[in-house]
Image (tube, rainbow, N blue to C red):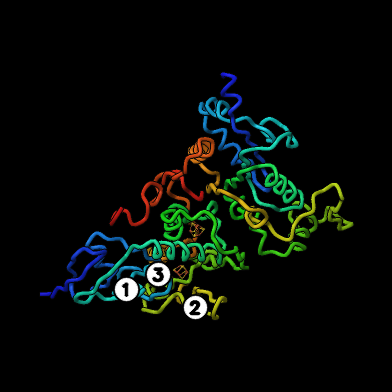
Amino acid sequence: MSPKAAKTRKIIATTSLAGCFGCHMSLLDIDERLFDLIELVEFNKSPFDDIKTFTRECDIGLVEGGCCNDENVHVLTEFRKHCKTLVAFGECALMGGLPALRNTIPLRECLEEAYLHGPTVAGRNPQGLIPSDPDIPKILNRVYPCHEVVKIDYFLPGCPPSADLIWDALVALVTGQELEPQYRTFKFD
Amino acid sequence: MASFVRFTLDGRACLAEEGAQLVAAAKECGVYIPTLCNYPGIPPKGACRICTVLVNGIPQTACTTKVVEDMAVVTRTPELEEFRKAVVEILFAEGNHLCPSCERSGNCELQALAYRYRVTVPHFPYLFPKRDVEAWHPKLVKDHNRCIQCKRCIRGIHNAEGKAIFAFGKRGDKVVINIDPETSKNISDELAQRAMDICPVGAILRKGKGFDTPIGRRKYDHQPIGSEVQA
Ligand code: SF4
Ligand code: SF4
Ligand code: FES
């Protein structure tokens, strides 16, 4: 790549909150366009390069997953702070997704099912312990879609969003074009 | 012979049989008016409002409107399209629609309308209401999380003795559409299938059915809803 291209590359950060990493896998599904992608962008904080904390301000932040614990809220707030444009991608980021199945069940019931009564734990936790260590992220009363926590600039639906939709969106963001998603890539499943 | 009336649709002169339902008449003339609670062959209800058009300048539901001579109908304005999008958004926000795990995904009218209007997140807060799934009926499953209370099932599905199988209970935001355990007990597989088909969403399922069409071959995978009538 020419040094000039390197200088104009957009800086991008990505994270997976309460998601399954499927959206990140879908991004990798752009196949050989990955070579074009690294011409267009440089990754900062992201599981792709394992940079754990922001080392500079970013142009684009891609967020997978909603917020199910206080650490998710912290990371999302950091992303808002450090990314000029914040994009929520995938159903979990947009509306909570499958983790939000618990949203209609009181938190205590969820924890008791997970640690005391569920078929894989029943009878194996005689002291009735529910973990609550300061080192473990605190679970929230329900799962929050990203836009209920911080301002989100763009949304990409899908479970996961199709590789083509992610690619089209990234190209649009990097080149400053408006994105008119193709019908076949605009899906909720 | 049926008598015909003249009317205009988005400024175009059209003909319809006297007394025709506006939704159906518009379709004949190649104009798509989106619907949700309307179903051909059963009495219209005017419940969802998504078919709202301007009739002589006044907003009116097209499924409950009959065409009359000289009627001027406008089906598309930016405001009407915004309104329709909002109707779809409200329905997503007030139920629990987890499309990735829904048997109806790809064949669902509500989802298809969300695709058509490019809904990503609603402008309304998600309510995450607590609703049940009734899986104990012998022939049907009722998932209340996905019910949009359009009442197509109540109006359209009766058992062999002509008794309604679906009925609604409670009121206001607590309304539920219930399966009558008695009248639904011995229904045929065909009727169970018809009940599943009449529901625009995945709120009525046949026991043991679902996910039988692969992604890519479902009804709305490639073409927006209504595009067979009008692009
Ligand atoms: S009923 Fe339709 S909109 Fe609701 S979850 Fe199922 S596919 Fe999605
Ligand atoms: S079960 Fe289906 S058809 Fe019946 S009211 Fe609910 S959404 Fe409509
Ligand atoms: S389709 Fe006309 S009000 Fe629902």
Choose between B27 and A81: the one closer to the eye: A81
Please give the name of the residue rendered at 74% of the width and 57% of the height, measured from the top-left corner: A140
- Indicate the position of residue A126 as horizontal and vertical percent values: 87, 56
Judge if badges 3 and 2 mark residues of a common chain: yes
Residue B151: assigned label: none
Judge if badges 3 and 1 mark residues of a common chain: yes
Give the chain letter at badge 3: B
Choose between A79 and B174: the one closer to the eye: A79
Point out the tag, 3 or 1, that comes first from the N-terminus.
Answer: 3
**Beta carbon at label 2 within 8 Å of ligand 2:** yes
Choose between B36 and B138: the one closer to the eye: B36
Choose between B134 and A38: the one closer to the eye: A38
Give the chain letter at badge 1: B
Instruction: State the separation of the CA atoms marked 2 and 1.
Output: 34 Å
- SS state under label 1: loop
Structural crowding at the residue carrying mark 3, measured as other residues with C-alpha within 10 Å and reported as few (<14), some (14–19) or many (≥20): many
In screen coordinates, is B26 left or right of A28?
Answer: left
In screen coordinates, is A16 left or right of B16?
Answer: right
User: Can you tell which of label 3 and label 2 is closer to the viewer?
Assistant: 3
User: Can you tell which of label 2 and label 1 is closer to the viewer?
Assistant: 1
User: Eyeballing the image, is A66 above or below B15?
Assistant: above
Structural crowding at the residue carrying mark 1, measured as other residues with C-alpha within 10 Å and reported as few (<14), some (14–19) or many (≥20): few
Residue identifier under label 3: B37
Point out the tag, 2 or 1, that comes first from the N-terminus.
Answer: 1
Residue identifier under label 1: B57
**Beta carbon at label 3 within 8 Å of ligand 3:** yes
- Indicate the position of residue B87 as horizontal and vertical percent values: 46, 66
Please give the name of the residue rendered at 21% of the width and 63% of the height, measured from the top-left corner: B12
Residue identifier under label 2: B168
- SS state under label 2: strand
